[in-house]
Amino acid sequence: MPHSPRNRRALRALRRATRLPSPFVALLLAAAAPPALAEWDVDGLEELIPHHETRLERDRLLESGGRPIDPRGLRADPPPTAPVRNCAEWEPVTGVLVRYPLGVPYSLLRDLDDVVTLHVIVSSGYLNQAKSNLAAGGVDTTMVDWLVKPNDTIWVRDYGPWFVFDGNGDLGIIDHVYNRPWRPNDDRIPSEFGAEYGIPVFEHDMWHTGGNYMCDGAHFAMSTDLVYDEALAHNGMTPAQVDQLMFDYYGITDYRVIDDISSGGIHHIDTWAKFLDEETVLIKEVWPSHYTYSNLEQRATLIASLLASTGRPYEVVRVYCQNIGGGEPASYTNSLFVNDGIYVPMFSNATGDSAALDVYRAAAPGYIVRGYAYGGWLTDDALHCRAKGVMDAGMLRVAHVPVVGDVAGPVVIRALVDDRSLQGIASVDLHYRLDGGSWTALGMSAVGGDEYEAMIPASSVEAIADYYVLASDRSGREEGSPRVAPDAWHTFTLLPSGTGVGDRVADGRAPLAFPNPFLDRTRFSFELKHPDRVELAVYDVAGRRVRHLLAERRDSGLHEIEWDGRDETGRRVPSGVYYFRLRAAGIVHTRPVVLTR
C-alpha cells in the first residue's frame, strides 16, 4: 500500500528510537518500501538508490531510454605528465562535493559552509527545491556552487573525481570507470566537474570505486582485493597491470591490495580502515562474536607489519564499533577530512559515539573533531561515502618525515615546501622547544629545489624536543608539519652529542633509506630473517631503472647498501625523486628518496 514521505520518515524515526525494531515496526517498514531500496533522502523527495545496483533501477534506466556503460565503448586517455602525485584526503581543499537530494544532514552542510564551498550535484528538475530547502536548512547559499547535471545516486565518493598533480605541478582529475554500469549519469560526473571548473580530465578504462581506495599523498595507497577482482572480470587485467595503471595515472609506487574482511557487503576499504596520516591507520574493532572479528584482527596485525612511505611501520589505531542493530557494527571509520577538521558519523549511542570521537582526538591531535548523528548512516557506508573534498589547485604543501625516537644532537630538520600558487614562498620557519619550555623560531634555509632545512642545536643533557614546521606563501596560504601546526607538534628525545645514537625509529630499526633527502650519498637498509636472494635497484619517476645495486644471495641479518647518486655509467643524476625497489622473500618494497644537488 502507498505511504507518504512523511509517514516513511516517521517509521524510520520509530526504528531509530527502538534501535532493534519490534516485529510490528519491521512489518510496517517492509510494507512501506520495496526491500531493494535503502532509504529516503533528507527532504523526503525520493527513495534513494542503495549502494548495490537493483533490478528496479535497471528497469527505470531502460524505460527512460538510457543505457548502461558498455565496456566495448570505453576509451583511455594518455596519463598525465609524469611524475604524478595523487592527493591525500587531508591535503588542503577549497570545497566539498555532495549530491542533492541529500544523503547527509543539514547540520553537516551548515558547518562545512563556514570553511569551504559546497559543490552540489543536482538535476535541473530538483534545482529550485534544492535552493529553497538548503536555505531553509540554514545553509549559506552564497557558499554553494551548483553542478546542474543528470545524476543517479548520493555516492559521490565512489564516482566522484580523484585529484592529482602532474609533473608540471598542475591539478588534474583522473576519471575511472565507476563500477556500477547501470549508473551512467554518475559515471560522467568527474568529466562534467572538470569541464565546469576548467580542470583537465584524464580517463582510463579500468573499473574502480572511490570508497575502496585511500592514499597517503606520498605515492602509497591501499584497497581491498575488490580492485583486482573487478579489473580481471571486466578489463581482463592482471594485478601487475593494475599496479602499472595506478602508477601511470596516479603515481602510486606501492599499492597495498589487501583481502577484504568479509565475503559479503560492498568490499570497500573505507568501511573498516582509514589513513589518518602517512604513518597512522585507523581500523574498526568489533565484538569477538561478530563474523568479521577474526579477519579484522588479522588485517590490523598485517598492516602494522607494513612499512609506510616514511620507512617506518604503520601505527594502527583501533576504534570500537558497537552493534547498531541487527548485529551490524557502527561505521566510525567512514569519516571525512576537511582541512583542519575531521567529521565523524554518530549513531545515537552516547557511550560509543563519545569513545569514537576520543579515539580520533588522541590519534589526530590538533584537529577539530565533530560528530554528526543521522538516521541514514549504514554499517557499510556513512559520511565518507557521501561527500568528497575538492583539492586546492594552488595549495601550499609541507612534506616532512618526522624525527622520532632517540636522536643525538644537533638534529637537522628538512622539509619539502611545494607552492602551487606560483606566487612564491614568503617564509619557512622551524619552531622548537626543549622539555616544554618556550618556543624558539628559526628561519629555514633553501637547500635546493623545494627543500628547506634548519638545525635543532645539540643539548648537553637529555631532553624532550617538540618541534613543528610552518610555511606561508605570498597568496596568504599557510601550512605546516604537522598539518594542524601550531596546534600539534612532533616529539622526539634529544640526546647529548657524542652518544653515537643516529636517527632511529622508536623500536630501534633504521629507516629503509637514510639520509632522505640526501645530497651525495644515501644508504638503503634491510633485514633478512633467513638467507635469501635479494635484488635492489634504483628507478626514476618514469619507472626507468637508473642503477642496479644488488642481485645476489645474502645471509640473514641487517644489510646496508649505499647509493652515490650515480647511474650505471657513473654519471651524476639530476635532483629529483627516485625509488629504491627491493625484491626479497617474495615481497617487493618500494621506497622514495629525494636527491638534492
Image: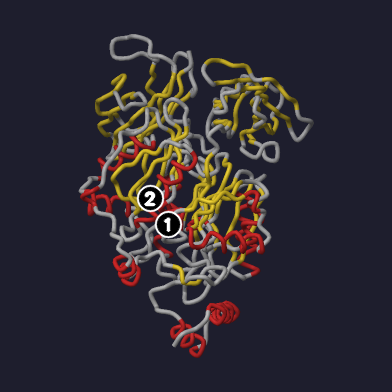
Q: Residue at x 76, y 30 (%)?
A: 439
Classify mark 1: helix, strand or loop.
Answer: loop
Q: Indicate the position of residue 542 as horizontal and vertical percent values.
A: 33, 26
Work out whether mark 1 precedes mark 2 in sequence or the reverse, and give the earlier one: 1
Q: Residue flagged by tag 1: what amino acid is it?
A: Pro
Classify mark 2: helix, strand or loop.
Answer: loop
Q: Is residue 73 left or right of residue 563?
A: left
Q: How many marks?
A: 2
Q: Which of these two is toward me, 144 or 362?
A: 144
Q: Is residue 377 above or below residue 274?
A: below
Q: Is residue 435 left or right of residue 397?
A: right
| Residue located beneath label 1 in the image | 150
**Is residue 472 at all visible to an observer of this figure?**
yes
Q: Which of these two is toward me, 97 or 146?
A: 146
Q: Residue at x 28, y 55 (%)?
A: 69
Q: Indicate the position of residue 2 as horizontal and vertical percent values.
A: 46, 85
1 and 2 marks in contact (CB < 8 Å): yes
Q: Is residue 242 left or right of residue 145?
A: left
Q: Is residue 593 above or below residue 20?
A: above
What numbered label is drawn on residue 374? none
